[in-house]
Amino acid sequence: MRAAMDKIRMTTPLVEMDGDEMTRVLWQWIKEELLTPFIDLKTEYYDLGLVNRDACLDRVTVEAANAVKRLGVGVKCATITPNAQRVTEYGLKEMYKSPNGTIRAILDGTVFRTPIIVRGITPTVRTWTQPISIARHAYGDIYKASELYVDGPARAELVVTYPDGRKESKEIFSFRAPGVLMGMHNTDASIASFAHACFNYALDTKRDLWFSAKDTISKIYDHRFKDIFAEIFETEYRERFAAAGIEYFYTLIDDAVARVIRSPGGMIWACKNYDGDVMSDMVATAFGSLAMMTSVLVSPDGKYEYEAAHGTVTRHYYKYKEGQTTSTNSVATIYAWSGALRKRAQMDGLTELERFADKLEKAVIDTIESGVMTKDLAAISTLDNIRTVDSLTFIRAIRHTLEENL
Ligand code: NAP
Ligand code: MG
C-alpha cells in the first residue's frame, strides 16, 4: 500500500454510480484491490442501487446524470431494471424505469459497444483481429412505432396534419383481407446528434467510421439518415478526419454486413436502432463473451459515461448471498473504470493517471493470457494452462500482475 502522497493524483472527481447485486459486490472489490491502493481516488458518489432508488423515488438517477453533464465523465455499475417480480422482491413503491434509459435521455447520447480481445479466446470470424465497435442509434424507428392489426378489407393511409391545418396524405396499402400495419418516425435533431456522437467518437479513438442503412429501398426515411450524416461530415468533420488519418463512408447495410465479415475489424460501425440492436448481439457473441463487452455512452457535446454491457449477474448474486463463492467475470466492469479514468486524465492533462489506466488494462489482459481466468472464459479459452478461479481471487491476481508491471 502506497502512502497517500505517493498515490496518483486526480483533480476533477469522476461521477461514480453504484449499482446492484453481484456487480455491486465486484464494484467494491475493484475499488479496494485495484484503485484506491494506487490512486488518490476522487469521485462524486451516487447510489443507484435499487434500495436507494426506491428510497428517493429514483431522484438519484436524474442527479447522477446531471452530474455527468456537469463534470464530463462518469462510471456506472450495472443496475436492476425493475419488473413485477422485482417490485415484490424489493417491496418497491413504483416500477421504476431503466436507469440507463433515464441517463441516455438526459445526456442525449449514443451507446458504443466494444469487445475486449485476449489471446486464447478466438473470434468465431477468423479474420477479426481488432475489435469492432457498434454505435447504435438509441431513438425511434420500430421502438417508438404505432402498430395496428387490420381485420378485413380496408384502405390504410399516412396522414400528417400541420399546425396551420394543412394536411398531407399518402396511401400505404389497400387491404383486401386481414393484415398488419406500422407507422414509425425519427427526427432530424436526433439523427444529427447521433451523427455528431459517431464522428466525435471516431476522432477520439482514431478509427474509421462506417454507417449503413437501406436508402435504396427507403428513399425518404433511410435516405434522410444518409443525407444528414453526409452534410454534417462535409461541413464539420472532413478535414479533421483527414488530419487524423481516418475515413468515413456510407454503404448499404447488406454491403456493410458482407464487408465486416471479411474485414480484420477495427472500425466503428454506426447502425440504425434495430440494426444496432441485432448487430451488437451478433458481434458480442462472435467475439466470445458478454462479460468482455464494454459500453460507453457519448453525448453530442462530449460527455462520457462508461459501463459494462452485461447486467447485475443475478444468479451468481443469489449464490454469493448464500455464502458460496462465485466465478464472476469482472473484466468489463474494470474496463469501465479504466475507460473513465483515462478520459478524466485526458481532459485534465494527468499523464500519470492516463498511464495507470493503460497499465490496469494490460494487467487484466496479462492475467488472462497467463491462464488465470473466471469460469465463463475458461469454458471458451483455447489456452492449455488454464486455472479457473473465483471472483475475488481473479481480482487479486490482476492486482498482483499490476504491482509487478508498475
Ligand atoms: P446478466 O446479468 O447480464 O446475466 C445473464 C447471464 O450471463 C448470467 O446469469 C451469466 O450466466 C452470464 N453473465 C453475464 N455477465 C457475466 C459476468 N460478468 N461474469 C460471468 N457470467 C456473466 O443479465 P440478466 O440475468 O438478464 O439480468 C440481470 C439483471 O441485470 C436484471 O435485473 C436486469 O434488469 C439487469 N440489467 C442491467 C443492465 C445494465 O445496468 N446495463 C444491463 C442488462 C441487464 P450464467 O448464469 O450461466 O453463469
Ligand atoms: Mg438486443
Image (cartoon, rainbow, N blue to C red):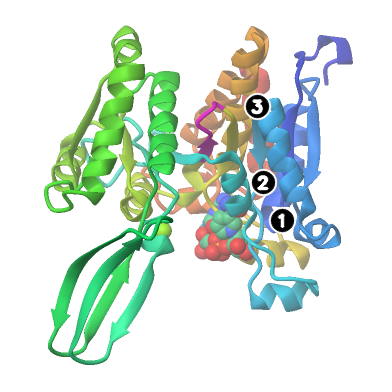
Per the model, the C-alpha gap separating discs 2 and 1 is 7 Å
Q: Which residue is mark 2?
A: 77
Secondary structure, mark 1, is loop
Q: Quadrant of the C terminus?
A: top right
CB of mark 1 near ligand 1 (< 8 Å):
yes
Q: Nearer the viewer, mark 3 or mark 2?
A: 3
Residue 60 horizontal/vertical position (percent) = 78, 49
Residue 162 lies in the magenta-colored region: no
Inspect this view and state whether residue 51 appears: yes
**Span shown in magenta:** 295-302
Secondary structure, mark 2, is loop
Callout 1, which amino acid?
Asp
Callout 3, which amino acid?
Gly
Considering only order in the chain, which callout, 1 or 3, is on the residue closer to the N terminus? 1
Q: Which residue is mark 3?
A: 72
CB of mark 2 near ligand 1 (< 8 Å):
yes
Residue 307 versus residue 36 in the image, above or below? below
Callout 2, which amino acid?
Cys
Residue occupying the point 60% across, 36% down = 305
Say whether marks 2 and 1 touch (CB < 8 Å).
yes
Inspect this view and state whether residue 383 appears: no
> Quarter for ligand 2?
bottom left
